[in-house]
Image: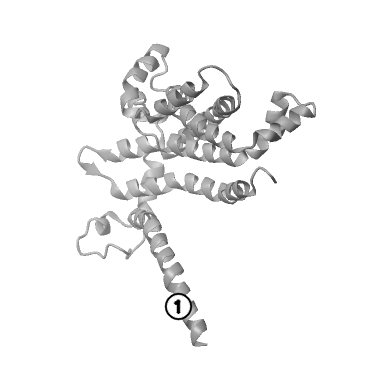
């Protein structure tokens, strides 16, 4: 009995306690945002109130967010931009990554390195020349500015990620299919793509996250309130000079993180199961 109790305590101290600390550390920002979003302004700015709890929950911060700002429009713009740019970048990344990983042509290795280097270039250096392109095309102050500029950093990321994933799929599987009469395109569609679904899902998740959280391009290229995305709209409209609407800011940040959390929770099991299944299965 004592040995069993000792093993139980050992498991509790070595596994559950560190996991509990990690969960508390990961969820505390969301808990803090939720508390700030349901506090009244009087309680929020009171130095005597207990900061880790709320005395009288209110919904005035959410009411102000939905009625006095264009938050729903910002969320729609973010979803539209995120879905379109993610789909476009993943499709281009799949084709480019497969070509660089499988096809042999002169300069393939150097082209792959160039894609990786272009992904490392920070957006703070690219928004100045891209702003000239946006103004020349006449798409400034519209969602088209984001639809055209976001692939500049999403496509290199998807290509680099999928290029490495395609290299992990055995080449012999395609060769067997081509020996049986399949074309290169047929082997790619019927053999490689089903095995590359975990990598494609991973690239899509990260691409959508990057486009959803992008701030510099959206701030630079769009100034109209009706065309803004959530990161820019919440920050610009709820911070006016030295006045910070902290309650509504926290409500907007919390609601803005919900779609990302839902997407990750929905695809996580499928991603892990597909990744652990491997190409042989």
- Left or right, 178 with reference to 244: right
Q: Residue at x 54, y 33 (%)?
A: 162
- Percent coordinates x, y for residue 270 in the rendering: 61, 48
Q: Is residue 251 above or below residue 219?
A: below
The front one of 96 and 112 is 112
- Percent coordinates x, y for residue 121 in the rendering: 36, 27
- Percent coordinates x, y for residue 220 in the rendering: 33, 26
Q: Is residue 246 above or below residue 46?
A: above
Disc tally is 1
Q: Residue at x 32, y 57 (%)?
A: 39
Q: Is residue 193 above or below residue 26?
A: above
The front one of 70 and 182 is 182
Mark 1 residue element: helix
Count residues near mark 1 (Cα–Cα under 10 Å), then give few for <14, some for 14-19, many for 20+: few
In which quadrant of the rendered view does residue 50 lie? bottom left
Q: Residue furthest right?
A: 180
What residue is pinned by disc 1? 9
Q: Residue at x 32, y 39 (%)?
A: 235
Q: Is residue 6 above or below residue 208?
A: below
In which quadrant of the rendered view does residue 71 lie? top left
Q: Residue furthest top?
A: 136
Judging from the image, the colouring scheme is: one colour
- Percent coordinates x, y for residue 148 in the rendering: 46, 22
Q: Residue at x 73, y 27 (%)?
A: 186
């Amino acid at each position: 009995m004592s040995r069993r109790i000792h093993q139980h305590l050992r498991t509790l101290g070595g596994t559950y306690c560190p996991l509990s600390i990690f969960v508390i550390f990961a969820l505390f920002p969301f808990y803090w945002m939720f508390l700030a979003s349901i506090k009244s302004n009087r309680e929020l700015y009171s130095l005597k109130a207990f900061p880790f709890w709320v005395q009288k929950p209110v919904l005035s911060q959410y009411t102000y967010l939905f009625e006095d700002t264009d938050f729903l429009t910002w969320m729609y713009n973010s979803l539209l931009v995120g879905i379109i740019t993610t789909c476009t970048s993943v499709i281009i990344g799949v084709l480019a990554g497969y070509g660089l990983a499988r096809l042999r042509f002169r300069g393939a290795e150097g082209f792959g390195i160039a894609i990786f280097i272009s992904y490392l270039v920070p957006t703070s250096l690219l928004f100045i020349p891209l702003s000239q392109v946006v103004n020349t095309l006449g798409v400034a102050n519209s969602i088209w500015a984001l639809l055209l500029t976001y692939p500049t950093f999403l496509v290199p990321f998807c290509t680099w990620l999928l290029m490495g994933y395609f290299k992990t799929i055995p080449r012999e599987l395609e060769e067997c299919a081509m020996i049986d009469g399949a074309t290169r395109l047929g082997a790619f569609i019927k053999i490689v793509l089903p095995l590359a679904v975990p990598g494609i899902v991973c690239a899509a998740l990260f691409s959508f996250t990057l486009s959803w959280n992008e701030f510099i391009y959206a701030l630079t290229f769009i100034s109209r309130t009706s065309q803004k995305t959530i990161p820019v709209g919440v920050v610009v409209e709820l911070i006016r000079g030295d006045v910070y609407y902290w309650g509504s800011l926290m409500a907007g940040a919390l609601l803005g993180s919900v779609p990302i959390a839902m997407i990750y929770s929905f695809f996580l099991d499928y991603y892990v199961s597909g990744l652990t299944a491997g190409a042989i299965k």
